[in-house]
Image (tube, rainbow, N blue to C red):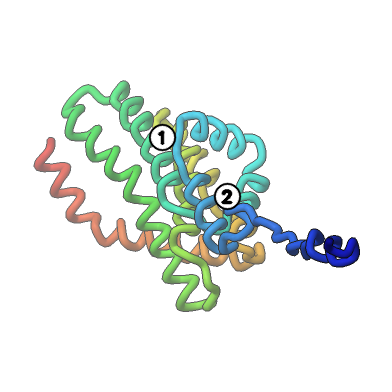
Amino acid sequence: MLDSKSTNQTSIKPALPLVKRESPLSSSNPQTINNQQSIINNRFTFGFYFQALTKMLSSPSRFYGKLPDETGFRQPLCFLIVSSLFFAGASLTTISENQILIGGILLVNAIAMPFVTAGISFLVITMSMGKRVTFARLFSIYAYASGVTLLASWIPLFVWLTEPWKWILIVIGLVRGCGFRWIQAILVVAVSIFVVVLFFWSLGPVIVQIRGIMG
């Protein structure tokens, strides 16, 4: 007959330590989580287009200030393309000849110019200020500003209002979205405008010849 004391000792088993099971999200690398979130945020829908348009019209400073750190090309580029398509299509209502050719030129110009001006500003910032700003983030500022103003630029004589409006939005974007001081943002925009004007002035003879061929 076994002793009661020994029976209790054999029946009692040491408790295993509880292991806390972590969820896949908590065990993931924070950098991976941020990258996944940035991919989700970079999806483009027409709902996003109208939300971004509303925010840019109501409070561009707040919109630029809330741009994600990992800014991609998809959302701003698609936003720009949609506005450019509207601009080119609406401009054809004021053109009676060579509509397909001129409409294509207007569409390409509307999409390409934000790339050109953002590239010029990127060079100015890198060479003169040494401030680290990614080209994707800089392009997003130019794309949203251009996309908003393109919706009214097709109206005759409205370009005298939309062009200053676009550059004001870009200055706000540089301050709120890139952390520039106001004077720095104004200088970047001023130099960029000067380079663009100088570039088109140098292309003046070529443009005149093209117009002569088309006319």
Query: The N terminus appears in which quarter of the rendering?
Result: bottom right
Q: Quadrant of residue 119?
A: bottom left
The residue lying at 29 percent from left, 38 percent from top is 107
> Label 2 is placed on what type of residue?
Ile
The residue lying at 74 percent from left, 63 percent from top is 16
Residue picked out by circle 2: 168
* Residue extending furthest toward the right: 5
Residue picked out by circle 1: 83
Left or right of 73 on screen, residue 10 = right
* Residue extending furthest toward the front: 1
Instruction: Work out whether residue 141 or residue 75 is closer to the camera in this orientation and state it.
Output: 75
Q: Is residue 103 visible?
A: yes
Q: Which badge, 2 or 1, comes first in the chain's sequence?
A: 1
User: Vertical placement of 38 versus 98: above or below?
Assistant: below
The residue lying at 44 percent from left, 66 percent from top is 122
The residue lying at 42 percent from left, 28 percent from top is 155
Q: Is residue 159 visible?
A: no
Q: Which mark is residue 117?
A: none
> Label 1 is placed on what type of residue?
Ser
Helix, strand, or loop for circle 2?
A: helix
Figure disc tally: 2
Q: In the rendering, at what x and y percent does residue 110 appear?
A: 34, 43
Q: In the rendering, at what x and y percent does residue 26 appear?
A: 64, 57
